[in-house]
Amino acid sequence: MTMTAAASAPSMPDTPEVAELPPLPEHLWGTLFHDVQSRGLFSDSKTFVDMIPTKSVEEIMADYARLCERYSNCSAAPCVSNDALRMFVEERFERIETQANVQPPERQSNARDHIDALWNVLTRQPRPRYNPNSSRLPLPHAYVVPGGRFNEIYYWDSYFTMLGLRESGRIDLMRDMVNNAAFLINAYGHVPNGNRTYYLSRSQPPFFCGMVGQLAQHDGEGVYEHYLPQMEREYTYWMDGAEALHHCEAYRRCVKISEGALLNRHWDDLNTPREESFREDMETACHSSRDHIEVWRNIRAGAESGWDFSSRWLTDPHDLSTIRTVDILPLDLNCLLYHMESILASTHRRIGHYQRADLFQSAANSRLDALRRLFWSQEEKRFGDYLWHENELTDSINASIVFTLYFGVATEEQATHVANTLEHQLLQPGGLMTSTIDTVQQWDAPNGWAPLQWMAIKGLKRYGHDRLADTIARRWMYNNFYRFEKDHKLLEKYNVMDLDGAPDGGEYPAQDGFGWTNGVLRALLALYPQATLENTAL
């Protein structure tokens, strides 16, 4: 079943219009892009695609053609050298948008004040027009970036950042964040991974209904009705093509499994190396005997999951080139779609659209039944990701199981087993680790991530497992406090096994800032107002 929006979007008079999809950096800069990215001219591949040119594209490409011609006439050096290429780029591009400051103007003595002071540092002001030479997409309202190399919004980060904004009294910024997401849905049909041109081909875990729900807690239930057109349009994006599917078929993000249930997977509309990780993706594909296009498609789909990357997507947990994201129906994604369907049903029912409410409720009921049966191993007493070709769960034990608690998917009996898995397989001195396997991927052991801690804590409390919830909260907060006392900063992710150790793995160093860490810790400080470094210690 797919559905289309029943009404036009709410009026946003200050919102700039987006007439067509902007060009990607690869298309904009052609041979220059390929030369810079394939050679690894910058230690972080994201640097170049976020740089701002100081001259027109035509002028820069003409200059580069002349530079290449000079080198081609020199038999000793037929290609532009790395030093010459770097000098060429640095003279014609600025790095003003490649890094976000992560330090407040004045040093704060405690984490709460540090977070409150950081919101203004991490806030970006709206830009009324699109700059065709920049990869940044315009947004009509102020927004909060995570920090460090992440100097743009990120979709699911925004939900957890909003938790902290609410506790800091920044309701203005919460509304701005929701309105920006609504604008992106109006403009592109979905919320992209982030507001960069190279993120437009994919989304991220769809938390828009949750963002609206946070705002509704402050502004009232009418908020759901106001954003109903965007909630429906996002649902249409995720269910695109569902009506034409036969059993055991997939189209984009929608899969109809053998028994007929409609479920979802991650996808990216492109099958090329990610522009912000071009060299890394080229190297990964070269290490595989698979068709490179297949590898890149699955890498991109893994990036849409937000878990980029994790052993949960890999056939061989230690080899990224075995990634198989499109063959997996993720537990967390389908919990989010269940929540989306439930919110759409309840919103339509509240405003008297009973037929549409029944349609969405039927979809939610069908997905809930599939989640409780197909994503659950009765033999192993665990939830997991579903391999839709093989009709079985993957072997991965990971913290995505917290979604079943947070969104009320698990039965009481299943919730007890989820709590047992969290406590005995994932709980560590510094919080919940992301999986049971230590790999070179950042969404694996020994790392822990703020959003998963929050969802575990709130989800466990929802099912009455308060003791375990409080234990996870205490350990995670101690980890945050401990590192804050040592380094006076909050991190993107934490080592939960060795509190003196750095986070492990990933395509880039652990970033400071940091949006969703700040948001979750600020919200936990509201739940546990007496928490300090001393009284959260083990």
Image: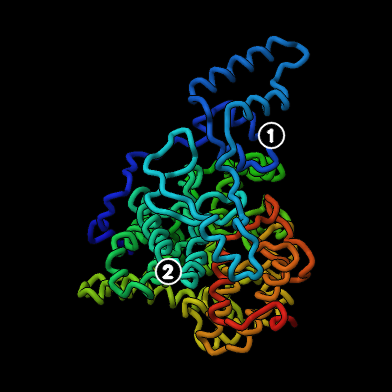
The quadrant of the rendering that contains the N terminus is bottom left
**Does the image show residue 319?**
yes
Up the image or down, 423 lies above or below 250; here it is below
Residue 39, quarter of picture: top right
Residue at 32% over, 39% down: 19
| Quadrant in the rendering for residue 49 | top right
- Badge 1 marks a residue whose secondary structure is loop
Q: Nearer the viewer, residue 477 or 18?
A: 477
Asked if residue 84 is positioned above or below residue 328 in the image, the reply reads above
Where is residue 191? Give x, y as percent.
Answer: 42, 54
Q: Relative to 487, does residue 422 appear above or below in the rendering? A: below
- Residue occupied by mark 1: 41
Q: How many marks?
A: 2
Is tag 2's residue or tag 1's residue first in the polypeptide sequence?
1
Q: Is residue 461 left or right of residue 236?
A: right
- Residue drawn at (33%, 45%) of the image: 16
Looking at the picture, which amino acid does disc 2 mark?
Gly
* Colour pattern: rainbow
- The one nearer the camera, 149 or 370, is 149
Of residues 532 and 146, the one nearer the viewer is 532
Q: Nearer the viewer, residue 396 or 278?
A: 278
Which residue is painted at 28% across and 53% down in the image?
A: 12
How crowded pointer 1 is (Cα within 10 Å; few <14, some 14-19, many 20+) is rated as: some
Instruction: Return the mark for residue 210.
Output: 2
Q: Secondary structure at mark 2?
A: helix
Q: What x and y, as percent, mark residue 399?
A: 62, 71
Query: Which residue ends up furthest to the left in the rendered image?
Result: 352
Q: Left or right of 303: which side holds 81?
A: right
Label 2 vs label 1: CA separation? Answer: 40 Å
